[in-house]
Amino acid sequence: MLSGCRETAFIYAITSAAVTHAVARSCAEGSIESCTCDYSHHSRGAPKSQGTIHGVKDWEWGGCSDNIGFGFKFSREFVDTGERGRSLREKMNLHNNEAGRTHVANEMRQECKCHGMSGSCTVKTCWMRLPNFRVVGDNLKDRFDGASRVMVSNAGSLRPYNPEHKPPTSKDLVYLEPSPGFCEKNPRLGIQGTHGRQCNDTSLGVDGCDLMCCGRGYRTQEIVVVERCACTFHWCCEVKCKLCRTKKTVHTCL
């Protein structure tokens, strides 16, 4: 594992978020015996702003909500194990773990289904559901780009490394030191470098040859790739494919 840089912060946050998301969803799907759907909303009733229209309810709680409470608790007990918060690095890890869980909880959204005669929507049943994990990952990637460098205060809490910056919020990722260089191989830190990596010569993003190859340039080659193609299903139960040879242009960092 890398030192306390922003990449490490992201790894801790997204791991914690993934556990929270997976457990909350699995509870609702009935995949875990020790938890069920979250029915806590049912006892609250619909918000007062929704009320009743001409004697017919606008909507009511029902269905099977993802159990974010159980997922949050399980992630704390599982992911935070061994992190006591005594050292600065442990404080950093615990903060980023909690930030990951918080992002998942904040993405809970209300979904509804209509009920009524002949396709009418006499009443809607609503529940709370998590989005695809990609949404959470994209949000954490944005936080990675704006992560806050921190140090420990005299009181033992995290504070900005730069006193002119605002203190990090519960949703911000925090790190302790600048990131190492990833261009060259560094076995001590487990960095493989980018020599020999395939890149995209048309992309302006991190997968683009200009960025990934760190200005060293890249080699372009025509290679022959053998892939499965023209696959068909045969009853029962087998998929048969042909092997196709195609030419492909690949770009490799020098």
Image (cartoon, helix red, strand yellow):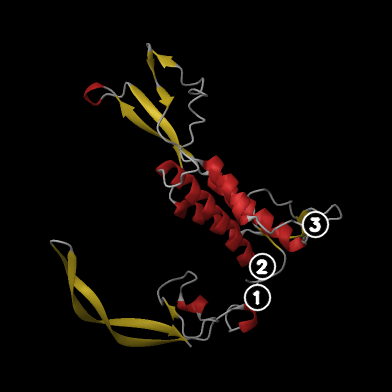
Closer to the eye: label 2 or 3: 2
> In the picture, residue 223 is in which quadrant?
bottom left
Residue hosting label 3? 163
Would you name the residue on which mark 1 appears? 180
Coordinates of residue 182 in the picture (x, y in percent): 59, 78
x 31%, y 24%: residue: 121
Residue 242 at least partly seen? yes
Left or right: 21 as drawn, with respect to 7: left
Write the residue at 53% across / 47% down: 104
Whole-number angstrom distance, CA of label 2 to CA of label 3: 19 Å
Label 3: which secondary element: loop
Location of residue 135 with respect to 217 vertically, above or below = above
Crowding at mark 1 (Cα within 10 Å: few <14, some 14-19, many 20+): some
* Residue furthest out toward the right: 154
Q: Quadrant of residue 238?
A: bottom left
Label 2 amino acid? Cys
Type of the residue with mark 1: Pro
Identify the residue at horizontal 76%, vertical 55% (top origin).
158
Which amino acid, by three-letter code, is at mark 3?
Pro
Circles 2 and 1: CB atoms closer than 8 Å: yes
Disc 1 and disc 3: Cα gap in Å? 24 Å
2 or 3: tag closer to the N-terminus? 2
Give how far across and how far down residue 81 sits, in percent.
65, 56
Say whether marks 1 and 3 touch (CB < 8 Å).
no
Of residues 15 and 147, which is closer to you in this image? 15
Say few, some or many: other residues with alpha carbon within 10 Å of mark 3 (under 14 / 14 to 19 / 20 or more).
Answer: few
